[in-house]
Amino acid sequence: MNKRIAIIGAGPSGMAQLRAFESARAKGVDVPEVVCFEKQRDWGGQWNYTWRTGLDEYGEPVHSSMYRHLWSNAPKECLEFAEYTFDEHFGHPVSSYPPRQVLWDYIQGRALQSNVRQYVRFETSVRAVQYLAAEDAFAVTSVHLPTGETTTDLYTEVVVANGHFSTPNMPAFPGIETFPGRICHAHDFRGAEDLGGKDVLLIGSSYSAEDIGIQAHKMGARSVTFSYRTRPMGFGWPDGARELPLVQRFEGRRAYFANGESHEFDAVFLCTGYKHHFPFLPSDLALKTQNCLYPDHLYKGVVSEANQRLFFLGMQDQWFTFNMFDAQAWYVRDVILGQASLPSPHQRRAEIDTWRERQESLSGDKDEVQFQADYIKDLIEATDYPMFDLEEVVATFLAWQEDKKADILRYRDVCYRSIMTCTLATPHHTRWLDAMDDSFDTYLGPALAEAAPR
Ligand code: FAD
Ligand code: NA7
């Protein structure tokens, strides 16, 4: 059969894949049919905020884990696309840590520019992918959610881009069922407005705990307690915030910690991470991995070892995001189009092993971010995606880490220089701690918002 490509998910990774094919088409390459399935009404993945939690209006698990007033948690200069810059999108410098809606607009701007929306089947959820050896193709079954109509079509290649920060890892703690207040996973957190004057407990010591904790502080929580399993985050927390070792048990409102302390709380947030979840894939094709920098069984981090026509985007733990997804999507495109050839399965396995051995030896942030930069460099060298100064991005990530250590409440007020255009970000008109209205128009200012592409 003729080549036909299915992309599952139109978040930043799936959109990068669409853009990659479109960029080849613009250069005169004969691109096969591409269909992108997106279960939400709009694209943008995590960045497409919803007030809903649990199930959506069609009974589908709600995808996005972002909350209403989320701002970028790393400098935008680290995630900038190499071939569609912030300058090009906004026409003027903006701050280094835009709110969610502004970054959503940026991702969207590039996709609209390349006219790829036509390839997306919205409100269409992929239910099953089955490899048919006789046809050497995949049967992809999807459901159009508003009508309930199911369709099965054959595709020669499948690109899985469904994200991996949506299915909560939900540990239990003895006695937690007796806690009378609000308990939810970070996935279901939508805002801290109701936490004013409250005592808040966050279990976990990574990005979600840190960010929801300082959001609770910003919104006037009386106290914020972080509870860690392995090690504390160690930032200079403001008055009223502290880190304690892991909760051992609950008795009603009271939590008992491993160091013998106990305290009463009004709300508990399980910031305990996520599981990679592929309900539409049979077990022999599904990726089984922890959240790590180099998941096993993926050559170049994207080509499935189980089937070389099956690809996964964005499955890594993420220092880099949008530009890493681009590098992956460009490489996957070239493999599909035959512009990049795959070595033998044995050689692919050996290369996976080499990366994974290096992953085992990593110690600390500097090693980790350098590892991911080297991984991206390896991908870009195999494609025509514009190479950018990855060492500068590493330096910016490390500076960001220092900013957080210096002041966890004010790091978002720091400005960085674009690695792509050298433009220096402008300070936001309101410092993050005081910025309560982070709508698109207020962020950009009315005149600039008018001028910016939507
Ligand atoms: P996603 O964004 O998760 O998109 C996956 C898409 O697949 C979704 O649109 C979903 O609806 C669709 N989908 C899933 N299953 C199906 C199906 N069966 N059928 C059809 N469609 C399906 N990154 C940053 O760079 N900066 C940040 O500040 C930042 N903050 C974050 C905060 C939170 C709370 C979280 C959870 C993540 C954050 N990230 C951040 C990382 C974020 O994951 C990436 O920026 C990016 O969204 C990942 O893109 P993706 O396309 O791989 O996955
Ligand atoms: P992460 O970065 O995967 O971190 C998960 C955290 O949860 C981490 O601190 C874990 O502790 C902790 N964890 C996991 N299981 C448990 C149990 N059973 N008990 C206590 N603590 C536990 O997930 P995040 O949600 O913070 O971040 C994911 C993305 O969302 C990220 O890209 C951000 O940009 C936003 P550990 O250190 O393993 O002991």
Image: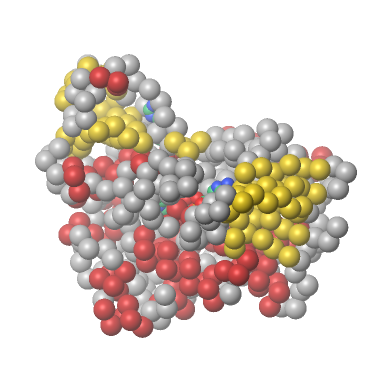
Q: Is residue 354 visible?
A: no
In the image: residue 10, left or right of residue 426: right
Which residue is pictured at 44% across the width and 73% down the height?
A: 86
Quadrant housing the C terminus: bottom left
Looking at the figure, which quarter contains the N terminus? bottom right
Name the quarter showing ligand 2: top left
**Residue drawn at (16%, 25%) of the image:** 264
Name the spot of residue 342 as percent of width and height, x first. 80, 52
Quick one: 399 or 274, which is closer to the camera? 274
Seen in the picture, residue 421 relative to 212 is either above or below; the reply is below
Please provide percent x and percent y for residue 269: 30, 35
Determine whether, in the image, residue 308 is placed left or right of residue 399.
right
User: Furthest-right residue in view?
Assistant: 134
Query: From this viewpoint, is residue 49 visible?
Result: yes
Which of the pair 204/30 is nearer the observer?
Answer: 30
Q: Quadrant of residue 240?
A: top left
The answer to whether 454 is drawn above or below residue 374 in the figure is below
Write the residue at 38% across / 79% down: 452
> Residue 210 location in percent, x, y?
31, 43
Q: Residue at x 31, y 69 (%)?
A: 440
Toward the viewer: 116 or 341? 116
Q: Is residue 354 left or right of residue 444?
A: right
In the picture shown, does residue 125 fall above or below 393?
above
Q: Position of residue 298 (x, y in %)?
A: 68, 43
- Nearest to the observer: residue 34 or residue 246: 34
Instruction: Give the number of callouts.
Output: 0
Along the horizontal axis of the image, is 178 left or right of 341? left
Which coloring applies here? Answer: secondary structure
